[in-house]
Amino acid sequence: MPLTSDDLAQISALTLQHYVQCAEEFREGTREHDVSQNIAALLRHIQGPAPYQILDFGCGPGRDLRTFRALGHQAIGLDGCPRFVEMAREDSGCEVWRQDFLALDLPPARFDGIFANAVLFHIPRQELPRILRQLHASLKPGGVLLSSNPRGDNQESWNGERYGAYYDLQNWQALLGAAGFVELEHYYRPPGLPREEQPWLASVWRSANPQQA
């Protein structure tokens, strides 16, 4: 059954409420997470001279914004959780936008890269094609999207107080391809472990140039 507007509003509200309630715990619990593999994968595929315009989509408390800024890039954060927005601004010194993922207002052709680390899986499947097209439109032609999500068997449901949709590689490739992205690479995380101990699927995508679309 399709999700109604009320269903979507509840999904957004309850998931954000969860993060509001655990914001301090989340920041401390993820402060030392090593996502340097994902940051490097995004940056090495961006074409043209640095510094780059980077959107940290779902920036959370700002850990990765601070890294992008330290590397010399012009990073902007976006998150729907008001406490995360405050934390990210204070911690990184970067501009941070408060926006609900289901009601985005993004500038066109603004970013060289979008870093969507552990965030897109919160978007219900029926809304994801629309959101991916919005992200595509916000990239400069040839811009790059990095996504990293917990992988699964193409099911979506509540996981405690958070909503999540979990895809295998084939279905994720189909969704991104339909939104106008071309795959550059994918890999499973954490690195160096057997596949059954790698719950994360990371992938890197380039937006098509207008003459290629």
Image: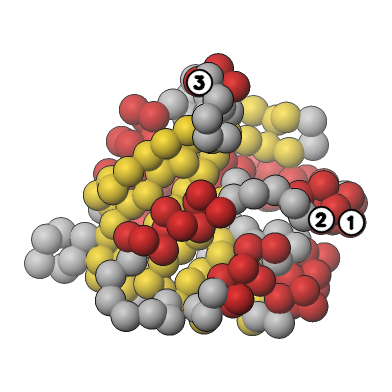
Q: Which mark is residue 24?
A: 1
The number of callouts visible is: 3
Residue positioned 42% across, 58% down in the render: 42
- In the picture, the disc for residue 212 is none
Question: Measured along the vertical axis of the image, is residue 185 above or below residue 209?
Answer: above
Q: Which residue is mark 3?
A: 195
Callouts 1 and 2 close, C-beta under 8 Å:
yes
- Kindly report which numbered mark, 2 or 3, lies closer to the viewer in this rendering: 3
Task: Indicate the amino acid at tag 2.
Answer: Arg
Locate residue 82 relative to residue 138 in the image: left or right: right
Q: Earlier in the sequence, mark 1 or mark 3?
A: 1
Going by the numbered disc 3, the residue's amino acid type is: Arg
Q: Nearer the viewer, mark 1 or mark 3?
A: 3
Q: Nearer the viewer, residue 113 or 100?
A: 113
Q: Amino acid at mark 1?
A: Glu
Question: Which residue in the structure is indicated by mark 2?
Answer: 27
**To which quarter of the image does residue 65 belong?**
bottom right
The one nearer the camera, 84 or 70, is 70
**Rendering quarter of residue 31:** bottom right
- Quadrant in the picture for the C terminus: bottom left
Write the residue at 31% across / 36% down: 174
| Residue neighbourhood size for the residue with mark 1, other residues' Cα within 10 Å, grouped as few (<14), some (14–19), many (≥20) | some
Cα separation, mark 1 vs mark 2, equals: 5 Å
For label 3, the SS is helix
Residue at 16% of width from left, 68% of height from top? 210
